[in-house]
Amino acid sequence: MSEYPKYAEIDNELYEINTDYEYALQCFKIIDDTSISDIERALTIISVLFGKENKNGEIVGIPKNLEVALEKASIFLSCGKETKSVKDIKKDMDFEYDKSYIRASFMSDYKIDLENTHMHFWKFCELITGLTENSILNRVRDLRNIDLSDYKDSKTRTKVQEAMERVALPENNEYDKEDMETLENFNKLLGDD
C-alpha cells in the first residue's frame, strides 16, 4: 500500500495538508479562474491546502514561506509527478465540468458514492486512472480524443462529430492567448518553467 502524503515540510516545520480530493478540486477551480490575479490565486491555493479554520472562523496554519508552500502545493496537486507545461496538455477532462461523469463512473466501477466519501486526492486520481474503458468518463474522454480523419464515410463522420460536440468541454476551457499567458505566469510562480 502506498503512503499518501499528509504533511509538507516547509522550513523544517511540518504543515498538515488538507488532503481530501474536494480541497484539490477547489484548487483547480481557482487555477482556472482568470478573474483574479496570479498572486491572489497562489495565496488562495495555499490557504485552501494548508489553512485550518479556528473557533473564531479565521484561517490559521498557513506557512510563512509562501514560495516554498506554493512549490509543495504544486507537487501535491500533481500527485508528486513532474508537471507539464499547460500548452503541452490536450485537455480531455475537467474535474468541475465532468463531475457527473466522474461520480457515475466511481459508482459503477467501484460502488463508491463520492457525495458521501472523503478520500485522499492522490487515491482519487489513482481511481480515475483505474476506471474501466466502459466507464462513462472514459467513454466521454475517448470520444473527445477521436481523430475525425479516421472516418472516411461522411455519414459516420457526421454522427461521430455530433457526438463529440455533445460531450465537448466548454469553449471557456480552451485557452486563448491571454489565458495561456496567465497560466504560463502561474506556472512560473509554481516553478514550472
Image (cartoon, rainbow, N blue to C red):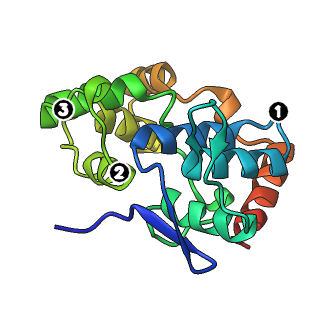
Q: Quadrant of residue 66?
A: bottom right
Q: Is residue 176 above or below residue 78?
A: above
Q: CA distance from mark 2 to mark 1?
A: 27 Å
Nearest the viewer among 168 and 153 is: 168
Distance from the alpha carbon under mark 1 to that under mark 3: 34 Å
Residue 135 in the image: above or below residue 178? above
Q: Residue at 70% across / 44% down in the picture? A: 44
Q: CA distance from mark 3 to mark 2?
A: 14 Å
Q: Residues within 10 Å of mark 3 (few under 14, many from 20)?
A: some
Q: Where is residue 30 shown, x and y percent of the image?
A: 67, 39
Which residue in the protein does label 1 denote?
A: 35
In the drawing, what numbered circle is on residue 125? 2
Q: Nearer the viewer, residue 76 or 172?
A: 76
Q: Which residue bears the numbered disc 3?
A: 112
Instruction: Give the residue displayed 74% in from the left and 68% down from the top.
Output: 67
Local SS, label 1:
loop
